[in-house]
Amino acid sequence: MNVIVRDTYDEMSKAAAEIIAGVVKAKPNCVIGLATGSTPIGTYKELIRMHKEEGLDFSQVRTFNLDEYLGLGMDLGKPYHLDQSYARFMYEELFKHINIPRENWLVPDGLTEDPEAYCKWYEEQIAAAGGIDIQVLGIGGDGHWGFNEPGSSLASRTRVVALTQKTLDDNYESFYKKAGFTRDQMPKFAITMGIGTILEARSAIMLANGAHKAEIVAKAIEGPITAQITATAMHLFKGSMTVILDRAAASKLQHLDHYLHTERAWQEMRSKG
Ligand code: PGA
C-alpha cells in the first residue's frame, strides 16, 4: 500500500486525477469505480480540465458508482440542490462535462422496485464489463467505504444497508442542510457495493482531506483490520492501493515520516530511470 501526502486539497486532487488519467490513457476502454461526497469534487474538476484542455478521452470509459440512497434517482426536472441523488451529483460534477456516453455510466438505481434483484444485477454488470480497473474511494467519518457502515462484512457484496446516525449527521451537514431539507427528509437506507466487491478492483485510490478526517484516517491506515472501520479492508487489497491525503488528514499518522521518505525514495529511483 502506498501513502501519498500533499500539502493542500488541490494538490491531493491533482495527484488523484493524474493516477486516474494514467489508467484512461493506458486503457481507453477502462472501467472506473467512482465515489460521491465532497472529497472527490476537486479530482473530478481536474479530470474535466484534462478533458477540455488536454483532450483526455472518456468516450470508451465505463463507470460504476459505489452507492446511492434508496428512494432517490436522478431527476433532471428538479434544480440540482433539490435533487440529492448521487446519480445527479455525478452528472453535475463530472459526467455532463466530459465525453462519456450516457450508456457507459451506471449509478445504483435507488428507485428500483426490487432492490435485492437489482443489487445482484449490478454485480453482474460489473463482472460483464470485465471488472473494475481503478476504484476511487473516500472515507466516511465512521470509517466507511461506500455505505459499508461499521459491522459490514469485509466480504460483503452489493446490497441494501441502513445508514448510521453518524453518516446521516455528516451528510445532513454537508449536503442536505444547504439544500433546505429537514433531517426527516433524508433517506435512511442505501444501496452500496460491498467491501468484497470493492476488493476485487484491480487498483484503488482512497482520498481524504481535512483535519476532521485525521483520526479515522490514522485508524484506517495504522490500526488493526476491523469490520468496525470498513476502510481497514485496504490492507486486504490484492491490487495496488494508494491512499492520497492532504496534510491535515495526514496529521495523526504515527508513521508519517516513513510515508514521506518512501515516496521521496521512489521518486528518486524513477528519476534515475
Ligand atoms: P465526504 O464523504 O467526501 O463528503 O467526506 C466521504 C464518505 O462518506 O465516503
Image (cartoon, rainbow, N blue to C red):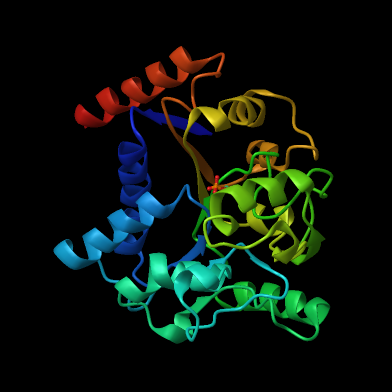
Q: Is residue 9 visible?
A: yes
The x, y position of residue 205, in whole percent, is 49, 46
Which one is in front, 211 or 104? 211
The x, y position of residue 232, in whole percent, is 68, 36
- Residue lying farthest to the left in this orientation: 53
Q: How many marks?
A: 0
Q: Quadrant of residue 4?
A: top left
Q: Quadrant of residue 30?
A: bottom left
Q: Does 218 sit left or right of 246 as displayed? A: right
Q: Quadrant of residue 233?
A: top right
Q: Does 52 sit left or right of 178 as displayed? A: left
Which one is in front, 108 or 75? 75
Q: Does 201 sit left or right of 150 as displayed? A: left
Residue sitting at x 74%, y 80%: 118
Up/down of 134 relative to 245, above or below: below
Up/down of 147 relative to 124, above or below: above
Please identify the quadrant where the C terminus is shown.
top left
Residue sitting at x 68%, y 76%: 110
Up/down of 138 relative to 175, above or below: above
The x, y position of residue 130, in whole percent, is 56, 72
Which one is in front, 162 or 60? 162
The x, y position of residue 27, in whole percent, is 36, 65
Q: Is residue 55 visible?
A: no
Residue sitting at x 75%, y 32%: 225
Which one is in front, 263 or 42? 42
